[in-house]
Amino acid sequence: MINIIDIHKNIILKIGFMWDSLHQFFSSIFVLIFCLFSTPIHAALDIEIFGGGASQIPIAIVPFVNEERLTQSVTAVVKSDLQRSGLFRIVDSGSSTPHGLSDIIYPDWQIRGVSALVIGSTRLLSNGQIEVRYRLVDVAKQEILISDMETVSVKRIRAVAHRMADHIYEKLTGDVGVFSTRIAYVEKQGKKYSLKVADADGFNARTAIEYIEPIISLAWSPDGTKIAYVSFENKKPIIHVQTLATGERKAIAKHRGSNSAPAWSPDGKKLAVVLSKKGGSQIFLINADGSGLRRLTRSPGIDTEPNFSPDGKSIIFTSDRGGSPQIYRMPVTGSVSRTAERLTFEGSYNVSPQYHHDGKSFTFIHRNGSRFNVAIQNLETRQVQLLTDSLFDESPSFAPNGKIILYATEIKGRGILAAVSSDGRTRQELSTREADIREPAWGPLRKSRRKF
Protein backbone atom coordinates (compact mmCIF):
# COMPACT_ATOMS: atom_id res chain seq x y z
CA MET A 1 0.00 0.00 0.00
CA ILE A 2 1.23 3.48 -0.78
CA ASN A 3 1.79 5.44 2.41
CA ILE A 4 -0.40 8.56 2.44
CA ILE A 5 2.71 10.54 3.22
CA ASP A 6 3.72 9.73 -0.33
CA ILE A 7 0.53 10.91 -1.88
CA HIS A 8 -0.10 14.24 -0.40
CA LYS A 9 2.14 17.05 0.64
CA ASN A 10 2.83 14.17 2.96
CA ILE A 11 1.56 15.38 6.25
CA ILE A 12 2.43 12.72 8.77
CA LEU A 13 0.28 11.03 11.40
CA LYS A 14 -2.84 13.25 11.36
CA ILE A 15 -5.92 11.06 11.26
CA GLY A 16 -9.30 11.89 9.92
CA PHE A 17 -9.54 14.84 7.51
CA MET A 18 -9.57 13.36 4.06
CA TRP A 19 -11.71 13.16 0.98
CA ASP A 20 -14.37 10.47 1.09
CA SER A 21 -12.98 8.80 -2.01
CA LEU A 22 -9.48 8.57 -0.57
CA HIS A 23 -10.79 7.44 2.80
CA GLN A 24 -12.10 4.22 1.32
CA PHE A 25 -8.91 3.52 -0.63
CA PHE A 26 -6.37 4.30 2.10
CA SER A 27 -8.10 2.58 5.01
CA SER A 28 -5.01 2.34 7.18
CA ILE A 29 -3.54 5.75 6.55
CA PHE A 30 -2.30 7.94 9.38
CA VAL A 31 -1.91 11.19 7.55
CA LEU A 32 -4.35 14.01 7.02
CA ILE A 33 -5.20 14.85 3.41
CA PHE A 34 -6.28 18.35 2.69
CA CYS A 35 -8.66 19.01 -0.12
CA LEU A 36 -9.16 22.51 -1.34
CA PHE A 37 -12.50 23.62 -2.46
CA SER A 38 -13.44 27.05 -3.68
CA THR A 39 -15.96 29.56 -4.89
CA PRO A 40 -17.64 29.71 -8.27
CA ILE A 41 -16.08 32.03 -10.84
CA HIS A 42 -18.65 34.77 -10.27
CA ALA A 43 -18.49 34.71 -6.48
CA ALA A 44 -16.00 35.86 -3.90
CA LEU A 45 -15.08 34.55 -0.51
CA ASP A 46 -17.12 35.90 2.40
CA ILE A 47 -14.67 37.51 4.83
CA GLU A 48 -15.22 37.92 8.55
CA ILE A 49 -12.53 39.66 10.59
CA PHE A 50 -11.82 38.99 14.28
CA GLY A 51 -9.63 41.16 16.48
CA GLY A 52 -7.30 43.88 15.26
CA GLY A 53 -3.81 45.25 15.46
CA ALA A 54 -2.62 46.92 18.64
CA SER A 55 -2.07 50.25 16.91
CA GLN A 56 -4.31 50.54 13.88
CA ILE A 57 -3.89 53.52 11.56
CA PRO A 58 -7.12 55.56 11.37
CA ILE A 59 -7.81 56.31 7.70
CA ALA A 60 -10.80 57.80 5.86
CA ILE A 61 -11.48 57.02 2.21
CA VAL A 62 -13.91 59.45 0.60
CA PRO A 63 -16.11 57.95 -2.17
CA PHE A 64 -14.49 58.77 -5.50
CA VAL A 65 -16.19 61.26 -7.81
CA ASN A 66 -18.46 59.58 -10.39
CA GLU A 67 -17.68 56.04 -9.23
CA GLU A 68 -21.41 55.40 -8.79
CA ARG A 69 -21.51 55.07 -12.58
CA LEU A 70 -19.15 52.10 -12.46
CA THR A 71 -20.14 48.49 -11.87
CA GLN A 72 -17.47 48.33 -9.15
CA SER A 73 -16.77 50.87 -6.40
CA VAL A 74 -13.07 51.72 -6.20
CA THR A 75 -13.34 52.94 -2.61
CA ALA A 76 -15.12 49.75 -1.49
CA VAL A 77 -12.24 47.59 -2.74
CA VAL A 78 -9.57 49.81 -1.18
CA LYS A 79 -11.42 49.91 2.15
CA SER A 80 -11.85 46.13 2.20
CA ASP A 81 -8.18 45.51 1.39
CA LEU A 82 -6.85 47.82 4.09
CA GLN A 83 -9.31 46.56 6.69
CA ARG A 84 -8.41 42.92 6.01
CA SER A 85 -4.76 43.68 6.78
CA GLY A 86 -5.72 44.34 10.41
CA LEU A 87 -3.46 47.41 10.47
CA PHE A 88 -6.05 50.04 9.56
CA ARG A 89 -9.19 51.40 11.20
CA ILE A 90 -11.57 52.73 8.57
CA VAL A 91 -13.20 56.00 9.64
CA ASP A 92 -16.52 56.73 7.94
CA SER A 93 -16.26 59.93 5.92
CA GLY A 94 -19.90 60.69 6.63
CA SER A 95 -21.15 63.89 4.99
CA SER A 96 -17.60 65.19 4.48
CA THR A 97 -16.83 64.54 0.83
CA PRO A 98 -13.85 66.63 -0.29
CA HIS A 99 -12.83 65.87 -3.87
CA GLY A 100 -9.91 68.28 -4.22
CA LEU A 101 -7.15 69.44 -1.91
CA SER A 102 -8.81 72.84 -1.49
CA ASP A 103 -11.94 71.11 -0.18
CA ILE A 104 -10.20 69.49 2.77
CA ILE A 105 -10.93 71.09 6.15
CA TYR A 106 -8.05 69.59 8.11
CA PRO A 107 -9.19 70.50 11.67
CA ASP A 108 -12.46 68.60 11.11
CA TRP A 109 -10.57 65.41 10.19
CA GLN A 110 -8.09 65.87 13.02
CA ILE A 111 -10.92 66.14 15.57
CA ARG A 112 -12.28 62.84 14.25
CA GLY A 113 -8.90 61.23 14.83
CA VAL A 114 -8.10 60.63 11.15
CA SER A 115 -4.39 60.28 10.37
CA ALA A 116 -4.62 59.70 6.62
CA LEU A 117 -7.19 60.73 4.04
CA VAL A 118 -7.78 59.35 0.54
CA ILE A 119 -9.64 61.36 -2.08
CA GLY A 120 -10.04 60.66 -5.78
CA SER A 121 -12.15 60.58 -8.91
CA THR A 122 -13.07 58.37 -11.86
CA ARG A 123 -13.76 59.58 -15.40
CA LEU A 124 -15.04 57.69 -18.44
CA LEU A 125 -12.91 58.49 -21.50
CA SER A 126 -14.10 58.56 -25.10
CA ASN A 127 -12.28 55.29 -25.86
CA GLY A 128 -14.18 53.45 -23.14
CA GLN A 129 -11.27 53.45 -20.69
CA ILE A 130 -11.60 54.68 -17.11
CA GLU A 131 -9.25 57.33 -15.74
CA VAL A 132 -8.70 56.90 -12.01
CA ARG A 133 -6.98 59.65 -9.98
CA TYR A 134 -6.29 59.64 -6.28
CA ARG A 135 -4.33 61.34 -3.51
CA LEU A 136 -3.21 60.10 -0.11
CA VAL A 137 -2.92 62.96 2.37
CA ASP A 138 -1.23 63.16 5.77
CA VAL A 139 -3.87 65.00 7.83
CA ALA A 140 -1.57 66.15 10.66
CA LYS A 141 1.13 67.52 8.36
CA GLN A 142 -1.33 68.56 5.63
CA GLU A 143 1.00 66.98 3.09
CA ILE A 144 0.39 64.89 -0.03
CA LEU A 145 1.96 61.46 0.39
CA ILE A 146 0.84 59.95 -2.93
CA SER A 147 -0.66 61.60 -6.03
CA ASP A 148 -1.22 59.50 -9.11
CA MET A 149 -3.43 58.59 -12.05
CA GLU A 150 -3.95 55.39 -14.02
CA THR A 151 -6.08 54.58 -17.05
CA VAL A 152 -7.61 51.10 -17.23
CA SER A 153 -10.41 49.17 -18.89
CA VAL A 154 -13.67 48.72 -17.04
CA LYS A 155 -12.74 45.08 -16.38
CA ARG A 156 -9.56 46.17 -14.59
CA ILE A 157 -11.16 48.46 -12.01
CA ARG A 158 -10.64 45.97 -9.18
CA ALA A 159 -7.01 45.53 -10.23
CA VAL A 160 -6.28 49.25 -10.08
CA ALA A 161 -8.04 49.47 -6.69
CA HIS A 162 -5.84 46.65 -5.36
CA ARG A 163 -2.73 48.48 -6.60
CA MET A 164 -3.89 51.65 -4.87
CA ALA A 165 -4.39 49.73 -1.63
CA ASP A 166 -0.92 48.20 -2.00
CA HIS A 167 0.77 51.58 -2.27
CA ILE A 168 -1.29 53.19 0.48
CA TYR A 169 -0.32 50.25 2.70
CA GLU A 170 3.35 50.56 1.73
CA LYS A 171 3.46 54.32 2.28
CA LEU A 172 1.87 54.17 5.71
CA THR A 173 3.44 50.97 7.09
CA GLY A 174 6.78 50.68 5.29
CA ASP A 175 5.98 47.08 4.29
CA VAL A 176 5.12 45.63 0.88
CA GLY A 177 1.42 45.40 0.06
CA VAL A 178 0.03 42.06 -1.13
CA PHE A 179 -3.48 42.97 -2.26
CA SER A 180 -2.54 42.54 -5.94
CA THR A 181 -1.31 39.00 -5.43
CA ARG A 182 -3.19 35.76 -6.08
CA ILE A 183 -4.05 32.62 -4.16
CA ALA A 184 -4.58 29.07 -5.40
CA TYR A 185 -6.71 26.31 -3.93
CA VAL A 186 -8.75 23.25 -4.90
CA GLU A 187 -12.52 23.19 -4.97
CA LYS A 188 -14.66 20.11 -4.58
CA GLN A 189 -18.23 20.19 -5.85
CA GLY A 190 -19.88 16.81 -6.04
CA LYS A 191 -17.31 14.46 -7.53
CA LYS A 192 -15.30 17.20 -9.25
CA TYR A 193 -12.01 18.62 -8.02
CA SER A 194 -10.91 21.94 -9.52
CA LEU A 195 -7.66 23.85 -9.14
CA LYS A 196 -8.67 27.49 -8.75
CA VAL A 197 -6.65 30.69 -8.97
CA ALA A 198 -8.17 33.89 -7.54
CA ASP A 199 -7.25 37.38 -6.44
CA ALA A 200 -6.04 37.61 -2.85
CA ASP A 201 -9.53 38.72 -1.76
CA GLY A 202 -11.21 35.71 -3.42
CA PHE A 203 -12.63 37.55 -6.44
CA ASN A 204 -12.04 36.63 -10.09
CA ALA A 205 -11.62 32.92 -9.39
CA ARG A 206 -10.74 30.94 -12.49
CA THR A 207 -10.40 27.21 -13.03
CA ALA A 208 -6.92 26.12 -14.11
CA ILE A 209 -7.69 22.39 -14.30
CA GLU A 210 -10.54 20.08 -13.32
CA TYR A 211 -10.76 16.32 -12.68
CA ILE A 212 -12.96 13.72 -11.04
CA GLU A 213 -9.86 12.62 -9.11
CA PRO A 214 -8.16 14.62 -6.31
CA ILE A 215 -5.68 17.44 -6.93
CA ILE A 216 -3.34 18.26 -4.05
CA SER A 217 -0.02 19.87 -3.03
CA LEU A 218 -0.17 23.21 -4.88
CA ALA A 219 3.07 25.18 -5.20
CA TRP A 220 3.56 28.48 -7.04
CA SER A 221 6.66 29.11 -9.14
CA PRO A 222 8.66 32.11 -7.87
CA ASP A 223 7.64 34.25 -10.86
CA GLY A 224 3.95 33.42 -10.42
CA THR A 225 3.50 32.06 -13.95
CA LYS A 226 3.25 28.35 -13.08
CA ILE A 227 1.82 26.06 -10.44
CA ALA A 228 3.15 22.62 -9.57
CA TYR A 229 0.64 20.15 -8.16
CA VAL A 230 -0.07 16.46 -7.66
CA SER A 231 -2.84 14.86 -9.70
CA PHE A 232 -4.48 11.45 -9.29
CA GLU A 233 -6.09 11.54 -12.75
CA ASN A 234 -4.40 8.25 -13.72
CA LYS A 235 -5.09 6.62 -10.33
CA LYS A 236 -1.49 7.38 -9.34
CA PRO A 237 0.07 10.48 -7.73
CA ILE A 238 2.04 12.34 -10.42
CA ILE A 239 3.58 15.82 -10.19
CA HIS A 240 2.59 18.25 -12.95
CA VAL A 241 3.68 21.82 -13.69
CA GLN A 242 1.09 23.99 -15.39
CA THR A 243 1.60 27.36 -17.08
CA LEU A 244 -1.32 29.54 -16.02
CA ALA A 245 -1.46 31.85 -19.04
CA THR A 246 -1.66 29.06 -21.63
CA GLY A 247 -2.94 26.07 -19.68
CA GLU A 248 0.02 24.04 -20.94
CA ARG A 249 1.15 21.42 -18.45
CA LYS A 250 3.87 18.81 -18.14
CA ALA A 251 4.31 15.76 -15.92
CA ILE A 252 7.73 16.31 -14.32
CA ALA A 253 7.72 13.39 -11.86
CA LYS A 254 5.95 10.11 -12.62
CA HIS A 255 8.34 7.57 -11.17
CA ARG A 256 7.43 4.18 -9.73
CA GLY A 257 5.59 4.56 -6.44
CA SER A 258 4.32 7.96 -5.37
CA ASN A 259 5.44 11.41 -6.51
CA SER A 260 4.42 14.22 -4.20
CA ALA A 261 5.05 17.46 -2.27
CA PRO A 262 6.68 19.68 -4.95
CA ALA A 263 8.52 22.81 -3.73
CA TRP A 264 10.23 25.37 -5.99
CA SER A 265 13.73 26.70 -5.43
CA PRO A 266 13.86 30.51 -5.15
CA ASP A 267 15.35 30.89 -8.65
CA GLY A 268 12.65 28.69 -10.19
CA LYS A 269 15.21 26.37 -11.80
CA LYS A 270 14.67 23.35 -9.56
CA LEU A 271 12.07 21.64 -7.41
CA ALA A 272 12.37 19.51 -4.31
CA VAL A 273 10.00 16.54 -4.55
CA VAL A 274 9.17 13.49 -2.45
CA LEU A 275 9.48 10.11 -4.17
CA SER A 276 9.09 6.52 -3.00
CA LYS A 277 10.92 5.04 -6.00
CA LYS A 278 13.67 3.73 -3.70
CA GLY A 279 11.27 2.39 -1.10
CA GLY A 280 10.31 4.84 1.64
CA SER A 281 9.44 8.49 1.09
CA GLN A 282 12.61 10.54 0.60
CA ILE A 283 13.35 14.03 -0.76
CA PHE A 284 14.92 14.46 -4.20
CA LEU A 285 15.99 17.48 -6.23
CA ILE A 286 15.03 17.80 -9.91
CA ASN A 287 15.31 20.45 -12.60
CA ALA A 288 12.15 22.38 -13.47
CA ASP A 289 11.68 20.21 -16.58
CA GLY A 290 11.93 16.98 -14.58
CA SER A 291 15.51 16.11 -15.52
CA GLY A 292 18.61 15.82 -13.31
CA LEU A 293 17.17 13.74 -10.48
CA ARG A 294 19.35 13.87 -7.35
CA ARG A 295 18.60 12.39 -3.95
CA LEU A 296 18.85 14.71 -0.95
CA THR A 297 17.75 12.78 2.14
CA ARG A 298 18.70 9.29 3.26
CA SER A 299 16.95 8.23 6.43
CA PRO A 300 15.14 5.15 7.72
CA GLY A 301 12.07 7.31 8.32
CA ILE A 302 9.68 9.27 6.13
CA ASP A 303 11.06 12.60 4.86
CA THR A 304 8.50 14.91 3.26
CA GLU A 305 7.10 18.45 2.83
CA PRO A 306 10.33 20.21 1.75
CA ASN A 307 10.47 24.00 1.62
CA PHE A 308 13.43 26.07 0.40
CA SER A 309 15.05 28.83 2.40
CA PRO A 310 14.82 32.27 0.72
CA ASP A 311 18.52 32.09 -0.26
CA GLY A 312 18.07 28.61 -1.74
CA LYS A 313 20.90 27.12 0.32
CA SER A 314 18.85 24.86 2.57
CA ILE A 315 15.48 23.20 3.01
CA ILE A 316 13.26 22.60 6.00
CA PHE A 317 11.11 19.48 5.93
CA THR A 318 9.01 17.08 7.98
CA SER A 319 10.44 13.74 9.09
CA ASP A 320 9.57 11.00 11.57
CA ARG A 321 13.17 9.76 11.68
CA GLY A 322 13.26 10.51 15.42
CA GLY A 323 10.07 8.58 16.19
CA SER A 324 7.52 11.38 15.77
CA PRO A 325 6.88 13.91 12.99
CA GLN A 326 9.16 16.89 13.54
CA ILE A 327 10.72 19.63 11.42
CA TYR A 328 14.34 19.42 10.30
CA ARG A 329 16.75 21.58 8.28
CA MET A 330 19.58 20.55 5.97
CA PRO A 331 21.78 22.25 3.33
CA VAL A 332 21.22 21.53 -0.37
CA THR A 333 24.22 23.35 -1.85
CA GLY A 334 27.98 23.36 -1.36
CA SER A 335 30.15 20.73 0.25
CA VAL A 336 28.59 21.07 3.70
CA SER A 337 27.52 17.83 5.36
CA ARG A 338 23.92 16.94 4.61
CA THR A 339 23.24 15.87 8.18
CA ALA A 340 19.81 17.16 9.11
CA GLU A 341 19.33 19.41 12.14
CA ARG A 342 16.15 19.02 14.17
CA LEU A 343 14.35 22.35 14.68
CA THR A 344 11.17 21.55 16.64
CA PHE A 345 11.13 20.07 20.13
CA GLU A 346 7.82 21.25 21.63
CA GLY A 347 5.29 18.43 21.45
CA SER A 348 5.23 15.19 19.48
CA TYR A 349 3.70 16.50 16.25
CA ASN A 350 5.00 19.37 14.10
CA VAL A 351 4.49 19.34 10.32
CA SER A 352 4.00 21.42 7.15
CA PRO A 353 6.83 23.98 7.52
CA GLN A 354 7.17 27.07 5.35
CA TYR A 355 9.90 29.71 5.60
CA HIS A 356 9.16 33.36 6.26
CA HIS A 357 10.42 35.51 3.36
CA ASP A 358 13.25 36.89 5.54
CA GLY A 359 14.49 33.39 6.44
CA LYS A 360 14.44 34.14 10.17
CA SER A 361 11.38 32.10 11.10
CA PHE A 362 8.94 29.53 9.73
CA THR A 363 5.29 28.67 10.11
CA PHE A 364 3.98 25.13 10.64
CA ILE A 365 1.19 23.03 12.12
CA HIS A 366 1.62 22.11 15.80
CA ARG A 367 -0.48 19.64 17.74
CA ASN A 368 -1.75 21.40 20.84
CA GLY A 369 -3.50 18.75 22.92
CA SER A 370 -6.25 17.46 20.65
CA ARG A 371 -6.03 20.51 18.38
CA PHE A 372 -3.89 21.12 15.30
CA ASN A 373 -2.97 24.79 15.10
CA VAL A 374 -0.91 27.23 13.07
CA ALA A 375 2.31 28.21 14.83
CA ILE A 376 5.44 30.20 14.07
CA GLN A 377 8.98 29.58 15.33
CA ASN A 378 11.96 31.91 15.43
CA LEU A 379 15.01 30.10 14.05
CA GLU A 380 17.49 31.91 16.28
CA THR A 381 15.70 31.78 19.63
CA ARG A 382 13.65 28.62 18.86
CA GLN A 383 10.69 30.39 20.52
CA VAL A 384 7.32 29.03 19.36
CA GLN A 385 4.11 31.07 19.22
CA LEU A 386 0.69 29.51 18.62
CA LEU A 387 -1.39 31.74 16.33
CA THR A 388 -4.76 29.92 16.21
CA ASP A 389 -6.99 27.98 18.60
CA SER A 390 -9.30 26.12 16.20
CA LEU A 391 -9.70 22.33 16.05
CA PHE A 392 -8.07 21.33 12.75
CA ASP A 393 -5.81 23.72 10.85
CA GLU A 394 -3.82 22.68 7.80
CA SER A 395 -1.41 23.90 5.11
CA PRO A 396 -0.14 27.30 6.38
CA SER A 397 1.11 29.59 3.59
CA PHE A 398 2.81 32.94 4.13
CA ALA A 399 1.76 36.04 2.21
CA PRO A 400 4.73 37.41 0.20
CA ASN A 401 5.35 40.12 2.81
CA GLY A 402 5.26 37.63 5.69
CA LYS A 403 2.59 39.59 7.56
CA ILE A 404 -0.32 37.18 7.02
CA ILE A 405 -0.56 33.38 7.01
CA LEU A 406 -3.28 31.74 4.92
CA TYR A 407 -4.37 28.28 6.04
CA ALA A 408 -7.20 25.76 5.82
CA THR A 409 -9.50 24.91 8.67
CA GLU A 410 -12.91 23.36 9.24
CA ILE A 411 -16.11 24.97 10.51
CA LYS A 412 -19.20 22.84 11.17
CA GLY A 413 -17.86 20.00 9.06
CA ARG A 414 -17.04 22.18 6.06
CA GLY A 415 -13.60 23.18 4.88
CA ILE A 416 -12.88 26.90 4.65
CA LEU A 417 -9.87 29.14 4.22
CA ALA A 418 -8.73 31.38 7.04
CA ALA A 419 -5.93 33.86 7.63
CA VAL A 420 -4.07 35.04 10.69
CA SER A 421 -1.56 37.84 11.10
CA SER A 422 1.97 36.63 11.86
CA ASP A 423 1.69 38.19 15.33
CA GLY A 424 -1.64 36.42 15.98
CA ARG A 425 -3.58 39.63 16.64
CA THR A 426 -5.91 39.54 13.65
CA ARG A 427 -7.76 36.50 12.29
CA GLN A 428 -10.06 36.18 9.30
CA GLU A 429 -12.40 33.47 8.10
CA LEU A 430 -12.94 33.26 4.35
CA SER A 431 -15.85 31.03 3.41
CA THR A 432 -18.40 30.31 0.70
CA ARG A 433 -21.89 28.92 0.87
CA GLU A 434 -21.49 26.68 -2.16
CA ALA A 435 -18.34 24.61 -1.64
CA ASP A 436 -15.62 23.35 0.66
CA ILE A 437 -12.17 24.86 0.32
CA ARG A 438 -8.83 23.78 1.80
CA GLU A 439 -5.04 23.81 1.44
CA PRO A 440 -4.31 27.27 0.09
CA ALA A 441 -1.10 28.41 -1.57
CA TRP A 442 -0.41 32.16 -1.61
CA GLY A 443 1.28 33.33 -4.81
CA PRO A 444 4.31 35.61 -5.06
CA LEU A 445 4.42 39.34 -5.69
CA ARG A 446 3.80 40.21 -9.32
CA LYS A 447 7.03 41.34 -10.96
CA SER A 448 5.23 43.73 -13.29
CA ARG A 449 3.32 45.52 -10.56
CA ARG A 450 3.14 49.20 -11.41
CA LYS A 451 4.77 51.61 -8.95
CA PHE A 452 2.78 54.75 -8.15
Image (cartoon, grey):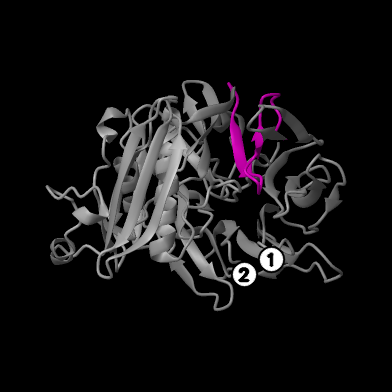
User: Which mark is on residue 329?
Assistant: 1
Q: CA distance from mark 2 to mark 1?
A: 7 Å
Seen in the picture, residue 345 relative to 176 is either above or below; the reply is below
Q: Residue 112 in the image: x percent, y percent?
A: 14, 62
**Residue 13: x and y, percent?**
57, 50
- Identity of the residue drawn at 57% across and 31% down: 22
Where is residue 336 shown, x and y percent of the image? Answer: 83, 71
Residue 150, quarter of the rendered image: top left
The image quadrant that residue 250 belongs to is: top right
Q: Residues within 10 Å of mark 2 (few under 14, many from 20)?
A: some
In this orientation, does residue 369 appear? Answer: no
Residue indicated by mark 2: 343
The span shown in magenta is: 211-239
- Circle 1 packing at 10 Å, graded few (<14), some (14-19), many (20+), is many
- Residue 285 lies, in percent from the top left, at 80, 51
Task: Judge by depth and name the residue closer to the eye, 58 or 388.
Answer: 58
Near-viewer residue (419 or 273): 419
